[in-house]
Amino acid sequence: MNISNQEQKRVRLKQFLKILSEDPSLVQQDGKTEARTLPELLMATGCRPCNEPVDMAELFSQLLGKLGKQACSADMMEHVMNGGTVDDFMNTAK
């Protein structure tokens, strides 16, 4: 049985989201700022979609660029899928 490339991407994304949901570095802790809303993140990147779907991978890559990072969303996904945390990635990404 041959699994399509699209199905492989769906399975990988589902695994990634499950790992993210269990990432201890994403738990809101006392004293940390509140998470930003999607419209705030879109404004930070200058993206203004007009009733269009938002490519979250592209949005995240743009946000990393605004932080001076050369890494992209695919780099973070690979880091997390290999057992790293988002916090570790943000502290070590160049």
Image: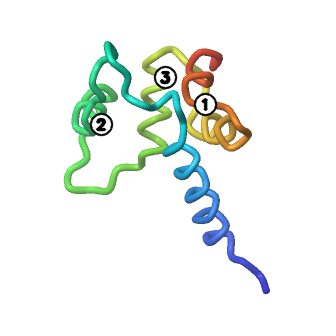
- Relative depth, front residue between 45 and 87: 87
Where, by quadrant of the figure, is residue 60 drawn?
A: top left
Q: What is the x, y in percent for residue 43?
A: 25, 30
Q: CA distance from mark 1 to mark 2?
A: 27 Å
At label 2, the amino acid type is Cys
Residue 1 lies, with reference to residue 91, above or below; the image says below
- Relative depth, front residue between 21 and 82: 21
Where, by quadrant of the figure, is residue 31 drawn?
A: top left
At label 1, the amino acid type is Thr
Position of the C terminus by quadrant: top right
Q: CA distance from mark 2 to mark 3?
A: 14 Å
Q: What is the x, y in percent for residue 75?
A: 65, 35
- Relative depth, front residue between 14 and 71: 14
Q: Is residue 48 left or right of residue 63?
A: left
At label 3, the amino acid type is Gly
User: What mark, if any, has residue 65 been given in the picture?
Assistant: 3
Q: What is the x, y in percent for residue 47?
A: 30, 36
Q: Residue extending furthest front? A: 30
Q: Residue extending furthest right? A: 1
Going 58% across and 65% down the picture, which residue do you hit?
10
Q: Nearer the viewer, mark 1 or mark 3?
A: 1
Q: Earlier in the sequence, mark 1 or mark 2?
A: 2
Q: Secondary structure at mark 1?
A: loop
Q: Secondary structure at mark 3?
A: helix
Going 29% across and 18% down the picture, which residue do you hit?
33
Going 62% across and 22% down the picture, which residue do you hit?
88
Residue 37 lies, with reference to residue 1, above or below; the image says above
Q: Is residue 70 left or right of residue 59?
A: right
Q: Earlier in the sequence, mark 1 or mark 3?
A: 3
**Which residue is denoted by mark 1 in the rendering?**
85
Quick one: label 2, few (<14), some, or many (20+) residues within 10 Å?
A: few
Going 59% across and 15% down the picture, which residue do you hit?
91
